[in-house]
Amino acid sequence: MDQGITFQDVTYRRQDRLILRGISLSLTARRIGVIGRNGSGKTTLLRLMAGLVAPSSGQIRLDGLDPAADRRAMLDRVGILFQNPDHQILFPTVEEELAFGLRQQGASATEAAAEVATLLQAEGRSHWAKALVASLSHGQKQWLCLMAVLLMRPATLLLDEPFAALDLPTQARLARRLAVLPQRIVTISHDPDAVAAADHLVWIEGGEVARQGRPADVLPAFRAEMARLGDADADTDLSH
Amino acid sequence: MLTLISPTETPLHRMPACLKLGAVAAGTVLALRVTSLPGTAGLLAGLGLTLLALGPGFARQAGQHLLALWPVVAIILIWHGWSGHWTAGAVVAGRMVFAIGLATLMTMTTRLADLLALAERGLAPLARLGMNPRAIALAMALVIRFTPVLLDKAAALRQAWQARSPKRPRTAIALPLALAALDDADHVAEALRARGGL
Amino acid sequence: MERNLTHIALFAALIAVLSLVPKIDLISGVPITAQSLGIMLCGTVLGAKRGAAAVLLFLALVALGLPLLSGGRGGIGVFMGPSVGYLVGFPVAAFVAGLVVERWRAPIGVAAFAGAVLGGILLLSAFGIVGLRAYSVLIAEGVADAKTFTWVQAVAAATPFLIGDTIKAVLAGAITQSLARLRPDSVLSRA
């Protein structure tokens, strides 16, 4: 029974700054998008979903569990992909990086190595096993991060600006790969094109939910607001 | 991160790490018992022949590593020669080069993984003192993973500097580098927590 | 928990980078690099225990054959040369530098400078000097007419570095202070 992701009146404060306020969501769709400007709080929203930070007030449930409290359970249920692969690849070689999550889930070294070898072969990349991460391109590192997370078979995948910094061919490849994944996928982005295919779209503005619904209902208003902001001069407020 | 191991395979590569370590220790003790010039010359000749037997490319690589010792050798020789004791100087310098040469030979023919396994066995008693071997292994992997990342950052900072100044950057890049280290540490900690933590 | 580990690992990497970034080599076999700056920062930013752990981690990887010392040197051979005293003194230097920053409640820049001087210069030089003398005695053992470093000579050999080291200590103070301002939660010696 899939209970989805729920937020009940969640606020998140960090060092006296209010980042998210009064967030209430019930997300059960297969493909969920979160859109907003830089600094709107959408990345924090993702971290709250993953349980990497706990809300200052309010309640979050993923699959009925509290992600921040139940870290062990989250390991099998949620995978998160950050924007910058260099911020999340921990090991110097490809096979070590891929095996790590499996070891964390309890697999032995041999079991993990076998699964990694199978994956690499299926992807036509067996020769990558001992390759140094430092020698991979950005897109290749992105692939590595995705594979490392998918190996852990999470039911929910959280993606932070996955298409940013990718060239068009790599974007197309990634989009194709993501489209066929069985997991629930939550994608956050500042770019409407990245979330246009979502089943449900949430627009975060200034730490609050501005609007949510189908992309066709949300995006026109979003684009209009972004255009309006773009026509006005930039705000020079130093508070952020 | 490239290690100092030689890519050219030699018979020594297959020898177990603990035997090689023992040989280095024994060889060093032996070297300290040799006190004559002919004896020292013999040791160095033996080392040189072994290196050549392992392949000319290998010998050249080893030679490059040992070349780094030339300032120390020069000082020892000149210092002894100053008072007319060239022979003594040659013996002292020669023994040192021999011992370090053995160690270099080991470093060039032993894989990181094998040395790591050896270290793990050797340090096993310390596990009682509360050290977590998994955490140590992870820490080592992180250093190997992030040294190239920070080196790239250092290169980028130097270029950013040189794009705006004719002088060479000296200490100015130390702060951004340290900042990068702190920020990367935070990101990696989060990534680690996202994948189950320690 | 994870933060301690990643801070220790990243600062061990920082030592390596500061060692490998090009600098000047001095002739007595002990190079002048930003290496000791890295050692000092481990102590002043991470504190005594974590700083020492970072340095020990660094030395362990060097011993295992990684070319992380200035000039790209590595392997157990480096511990068999005349600078062995300094290498042994590195973790102690970081520990003492960190201890000063943790215990002395002066403004962090001042405390970091003092720690860097006490640990990174005075203590480290002491280790280096003892190491130089002991090493020279060891390799001269049994050889007729061989000369060893007297204490005076060992001290003299260590002295040329003091100017460079003092500059590095000042830098350590300034950098630690800036980091404390920019990332107050990350400077673990005072967090």
Image (tube, coloured by chain):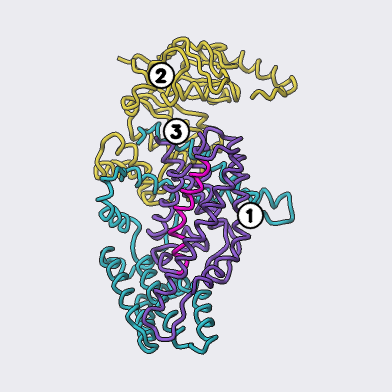
Asked if labels 2 and 3 share a chain, the reply is no
Quarter of the figure that contains the N terminus of chain C: top left
Image point 60% across, 53% down: which residue? C168
Q: How far apart in space, not on screen, are marks 3 and 1 (Cα)? A: 35 Å
User: Judging from the image, what secondary structure is the residue with disc 1 in?
Assistant: helix
Image point 30% across, 77% down: which residue? B30
Q: Position of residue A44 (x, y in %)?
A: 51, 23
Residue that badge 3 annotates: B190
Asked if labels 2 and 1 share a chain, the reply is no
**Residue type beneath disc 2:** Arg
The numbered dot on residue B107 is: none
Of B96 and A56, nearer the camera is: B96
Image point 45% across, 88% down: which residue? B87
Q: Which chain carries label 3?
A: B
**Residue type beneath disc 1:** Ile
User: Judging from the image, what secondary structure is the residue with disc 3 in?
Assistant: helix
Q: How crowded is mark 1: few (under 14 residues within 10 Å), some or many (20 or more)?
A: some
**Magenta stretch prevailing secondary structure:** helix
Tell which chain the image draws in purple: C
Residues at discs 2 and 3 in contact (Cβ within 8 Å) = no
Q: Position of residue B140 (x, y in %)?
A: 39, 49
Q: Residues within 10 Å of mark 3 (few under 14, many from 20)?
A: many
State the extent of the magenta-drawn residues as a range: C82-102
**Does residue C111 belong to the magenta stretch?**
no
